[in-house]
Amino acid sequence: MSDVAIVGVGCVGFLPITPELSYKELMYETAVKAYEDAGINPRKDVDVFVTCAEDYLEGFSIFDEFVPDQLGAALRHLFTVSGDGMLGLATAYMLIKTGHFDTVVVEAHSKASDILTYMDIVQFGLDPIFNRPLGGHPYYVAGMEMNRYMHDTGTTPEQCAQVVVKNRKNAISNPYAAYGANVTTDQVLCSDACFFPLKKLEISKPADGCVVMVLASENITRKLTDNPVWVKGVGWCTETPNLETRDWSRAVYTEIAAEMAYKSAKISNPWKEIDFAEIHDLFAYKELQHMEALKFCNYGQAGKLVEDGITALDGEFPINPSGGLLGMGYGLEASGMQKLLEVVLQLRGEAGSRQIPEAEVGLAQTWRGIPTATGAVAILSNSE
Amino acid sequence: MFGKKRVAIVGAGVTLFRRNIKETGKELSYEAVKMALNTAGMELKDMQSVVMGSAPDAFDGVHMKGEYLADGAGAHCKPYTRVFVGGGTGVFTPLAGWWHVASGQFDTCLVVCEEKMSSCYPHPQFAFTTIFDPILERPVGMNLIWIFALEMNRYMHKHNLKKEDIALVSVKNKRNALDNPIAQLAAEITVEDVLKSEIMAWPVQRLDVSPTSDGAAALILASEDVAKEVTDNPVWIDGVGWCIDSTQWTNRDLYYPDYVEYAARMAYKMAGIRNPPKEIDVAEPYDPFDYKELHHIEGLLLCKKGEAPKLTREGVTQRDGDLPTCPSGGLLGCGNPIAAAGLMKVSEIFWQLRGEAGKRQVPCDPRTGVAQAWGDLMQYGSVIVLRR
């Protein structure tokens, strides 16, 4: 079985609005960057194209139809994964592992600024019989989960707020980030409690952008680049769509996905063997909950690590050096790709002023947002 | 095939195809999964991964429909992915299952396809008004029947075909469906009946078209080792292929589906098939419209361009012919719950190759079969080659 590496990346955005680009132009510009980066011709050198999108977010009944041309994939082997970009990466990884395909392109994007009724769409993700008739803004689910998480673990509102302070600060030095800022814990705590106890500043704001990655088998990787980033392991899991039966304080989907990824990557002590991580922080408390699910610390201990500055950019174990979704903006189905992008840039030593010295192994984790309990984990490394 | 893993199908289940089934999409998925597991003699805990196929969210009015269906499809706490390529989804989903196992990542994969079109009220055709380009096409107010009428017309014109030639497909498939317990519109009809049926958009008439349906189907895929443990009779996935053409369907000649040919070539190459008409014993080309079966027989390289109507006229594509096509009754006879209909075709080939198709069994003792689906804006081809 061939190893699999990421040999090219491209990103446009992330920006609060992109009126100058249609979704097709956004995808085209990003794809061109990624193909240039990998040194490939999409019309000749790519075996499979994977795009990750959900119909309702695109405003089409079959979005797959509108993908091939701008990626250079007309009359070629393309398909859609209705899911997060990291599920696309997992798919590309498996395709290359079959031995039948050498080069696979993965694309995911967000044109959130085109969506006039985002919250209504999220509402349509709720069970139409049991949950949707309850009405209200669907982020109440996050407020309830945060409450349960803080109750069970003793995590404090201050600790959650410090995630926001850290991530938005990191985003200042990330050119791909839309919402870099210096905010204080007090500012976060004093912002509106939109979905008590979840505060306004603890919620990532949507952003537009696109990420394209080129993955290749071992043989092709050696021909294309001296600076590959190897995919050491991937894992993904859906816990349950039911709000009523899921675990509200643990991210079980991430626990199972991480177990799968650690097994492939032969990691037994994540805290020691991984240098940094990009974690899904659509809501500030989710970063803490996901850290625990990833076994970076014991259940209920993540808040303390943030408080002590251990997860800061210059800390012992940097988390979300990119600024996370709180700082970069929430790229909808591209959020997993935002995470992967930062890990790739760090492992290549291309992260500019936010570069983590001597980073060798990085972890990216994603979640599909409200109301799902679906997530994925990938472990990347710059050494074989 | 050195160093590459073989993947087998070891179980299949298909629910009834009907208009307005009472069960929810989750329940339909559950039923299909349960049947597939029972026939394979396996349990849900043996399934290491799950792949879902389902067509537009707009049918159900549920955003992220894959997530919503997860528990019904048996994906609780499992690696679970939904793939979506429009009408091609039903045959594409087992391809996704194939790479879950062929990659060595999993030993088993549960493939589930579900469609519940009846919840789109008053008619699922409304969900299709948003498959078109919002600037260039939607303002025209077109629907699927119109664009397929264009394609059918072009196909008839190019090969100088009469409607009688095409209606024979509808007659054959609806008759085949009489032997299929899941079928929604099985019937003994004549060419005359088709030609007299209501005109929807010329040349498409009522009996040229498959109905809208609810239904689900499931397959169990297993690695070589597991397959040999659970069955003496595995059916192997030896070729997979898929291809998408440009979004700009108005810019291409609609008389021939290049994208189906490219997908078929990909699958045949993988399966080592050089002469498809000789090596394929039974086929399930996608037949949401009667002319599409002909179109797809040609796209699958089972005959020369324009010759499929002749094969049909000569009875070659009947169950007892040299190249039986749609022995299941196809979409015209069984119904068209989009993704589930595609997976039903793959299930039919599975049963035909195992000799388990009962009254529908083709008499030629088939060893190799192909199933195909088609989707998007006359744009997508997905193909699977099975061998026993």
Image (spheres, coloured by chain):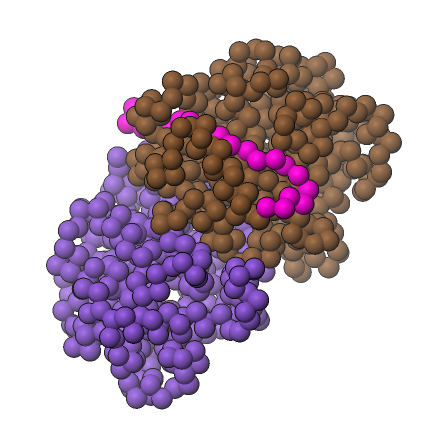
Chain colours: A purple, B brown
Report whether residue A367 is seen.
yes
In the image, what residue occupies the spot 80% across and 42% down? B201
The answer to whether any part of residue A34 appears in the image is no
Image position of A276 (left or right of B57)? left
Please say whether residue B362 is one of the residues in the magenta stretch. Answer: no
Relative image position of residue A161 (x, y in whole percent): 30, 80
Residue found farthest to the right: B196
Could you say where residue A382 lies in the image, as x and y percent from the top left?
A: 20, 53
Residue at (52% x, 53% y) in the render: B65
On screen, residue A334 above or below B301: below
Q: Quadrant of the N terminus of chain A?
A: top left
x, y (%) of residue A159?
25, 78
Number of disc labels:
0
- Residue lying at 80% horizontally and 36% vertically, measured from the top left: B205
Q: Give the main secondary structure, helix, strand or loop, of the magenta stretch.
A: loop
Which of B239/B329 is in front? Answer: B329
Quadrant of the image occupied by residue A56:
bottom right
Residue located 57% across and 35% down the image: B15
Is B300 rendered above or below residue B62? above
B262 or B223: nearer the viewer: B223
Q: Is residue B16 magenta?
A: yes
Q: Bounds of the magenta span? A: B1-23
